[in-house]
Every structure is written in structure tokens, then in C-alpha cells.
Amino acid sequence: MLIEFIKKRQLRQILFSIAMILIVSLVCSILKTWLSYKGVALILLMGVSVLAMTFDLIPVLISATLSALIWNYFFIPPLFTFAIGNTDDILMFSLYFIVAMVNAVLTNKIRKAEQKARDREEKENEVKLYNTLLNSLSHELRTPIATIIGAVDILNINEKNLSVANKKELINEIGKAIARLARQVDNLLNISRLESGMLRPKHTWCDLTEMMHQMLNSLDEVERNRISIHADESLPLVKIDAGILEQIILNIIYNALAYTPEKSKICIYIEVLSGQCKFIIEDYGLGFPEKEIALVFDKFYRLPKSKTGGVGLGLSIVKGFVEALSGKVILENHQGGGARFILNFPVQTSYLRNLKNE
């Protein structure tokens, strides 16, 4: 299959090369009144050089040979014969042929060397990315697992000596570690679903206010107290994939919780107007460096000098999920200091509450 593809590709290149040399020769023939045969040689040589920059070696060698023969037959006196009238022209023809061939070979070698350098650089970047990802993942997965194992060991060994408050604290730590572990696993599964194209949104009628309060209840009390929701009580029902929407908002919230000062507020504004559902999520941290804003949605990207933790998947999943819902996400820094995520989704709306059970 691969050999067939290479053969077809090379055949196309050969045909294109021959066609190009013939067209250039025809143009030179038309302009022969204003061009000397030496000028024609330069134009044909330029055509061969252009082909050498993009095509494989064999098509370029064929075009170089063809151009030399055409130049000899149609342009070098005496015309319409391969005989050459004087020694200077013989030397010129020989040099043209050699230069055309050397040009083809050297250009091809340069292209191959550049490709090898690019491949080597890409491989080095991939290895670097893989190591970074592996280190981050191992930390992100090992830390909560170690917390769970440590807490369980303490409960097993010192169960009788622990107070009720101590037990409650250990159980709370286990819960947090499990939630952190579940988030990382979910992120890995979600990025896999996005890349494989297996994500298929299921749009159903959704009460946004109810969804947001259920989502907040999934957070612990400290996290929940930092978040305020601003929405009109008379919001209509919207038709959207509530599960994907919840993941989008949660990933932005977790990002804000991780990288903003403790006890600083995170505000969520919800608006539905003219078939558009709009979320604005603001935090009061340091915001994002302006030069980095275009990169933060890239997979595995983390801001320079950001604190340890996380593997750079959260915001890339946000972008992928938003696009899966045919929406748009904009990130900017607001004047009060901190980041502002603006999410827009096209939706159907209804004020008939019984549609929730459709």
C-alpha cells in the first residue's frame, strides 16, 4: 500500500515536472525575440531550482535532463538539432547540464537534512513533553493515593486512640484525596474522548439555576463559600448537554480555586438572551500574562513558574467541550484584577417548566 502510494506520488511529480518545463520552454519560445539563448538557460535553470525545492530527486533529475535537451534543440544554434556549432556553446551546454544536476542533488540533500533536523526537534519535544506529563501525572496521582493510604493506615492502627474529631478529619482528608484523584482520571478520560471524536453531546432541557446549585453541592464547604452565583430567577429552560456544561464550569472553577488567594471570591454570572446562553466566570487572582492568554487552552500547557500540581488538561478540556457544544470561550483579564472567562452557547429556550421532564 505504501509502495503504491509512493509510486503514484512520484508519477504525479514527474508529470508535473515535465509539464512545468514544457510550459516554461513555450513561454521562452514566445519571448525568443527579446531573449538570447543564454537568457533562456537562466530561466530554465530557475524552473529546475523551483522544482528541486519541493519535489523528490528523480522527478527533478528528469526535469533537469529534459530542460537541457530542450534548450539545446530549440534555442542553441543551429536550431532543431542536437548538434552544437561551437566550442563555447558546447562548454556552456555541459556546464548547464552539470549545474542543473548538482542543483537538484544538493537541494534535495538540504531538504532531507532540514526534515531530519525538524523530526529530531519534534522527537526531543515529544520526549520532553512526555517526561513532563509523566512527572506531573505521577505527582497528581501519587499524592492523593498516598494521602488515602496514610489516612487509612492511621485509622486502622490507632482507631481506639483517635478522638471523634480526629477520625472525622481523617475521613474528610480521604474524601478530598478521592475527589482530587477522580478529577484527574476524569480529565484524562475526557481528553481521550475529545481526541478520539467519540464525544456526542445529548441535548436535553435543563434548569440552569438548579444545575448550578447541584454543582456547588458537589464542592466542599470551604470551596462553596468562595463562589457566588448571579442569575435572574426567571431564567428560561435551555436545551443543552447539562453534563458537559457542568464539566466546563467545574474545570474553570477548579482552576480558579487552585490559582487564586484563599478566601478570594469567584463570581458566576448567567444570562440567556436571543437564543444565546452566556456564562461569565470571574476570579480575583493575578490573572494571566497577556502573552500567555493565547496558549492557556493548549493541551498540557502550564504557565511558567506556576505552582506544582495539575497536568495542564483542565482548560484544554474546557475549550474542547465548549466547541463540542458549538459554543465559544473567551479569556481576558478584567479591570478589578483576575481572570474572566466568557462562555457563549447557542441554545433553544422555553419558559414551560414541564419540558424538564420531556
Image (cartoon, rainbow, N blue to C red):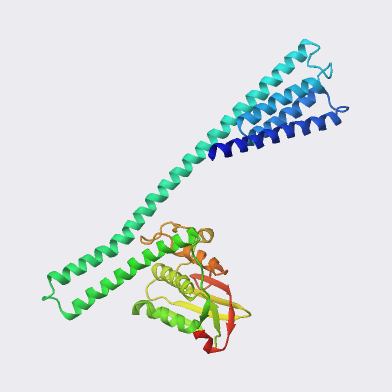
Q: Does residue 157 appear to the left or right of 87 in the view shown? A: left
Viewer-side residue, 245 vs 228 = 245
Image quarter (top left, top right, bottom left or bottom right) of the N terminus:
top right
In the rendered view, tell whether residue 122 sits above or below residue 48: below
Q: How many marks?
A: 0
Percent position (x, y) of residue 18?
72, 31
Which residue is depicted at the point 82% across and 30% down? 28
Residue furthest to the right: 33
* Residue 322 in sight: yes
Quarter of the rendering containing residue 185:
bottom left
Percent position (x, y) of residue 141?
31, 61
Q: Does residue 107 appear to the left or right of 289 in the view shown? A: right
Which residue is depicted at the point 59% across and 31% down? 108
Residue furthest to the left: 160
Residue furthest to the top: 87
Viewer-side residue, 145 vs 18 = 18
Quarter of the rendering containing residue 112:
top right
Which residue is depicted at the point 38% across and 54% down? 133
In the rendered view, tell whether residue 314 sits above or below residue 282: above
Viewer-side residue, 225 vs 354 = 354
Percent position (x, y) of residue 250?
43, 72
* Residue 334 in sight: no
In the rendered view, tell whether residue 261 sits above or below residue 308: below
Q: Does residue 340 appear to the left or right of 181 in the view shown? A: right
Percent position (x, y) of residue 201?
51, 70
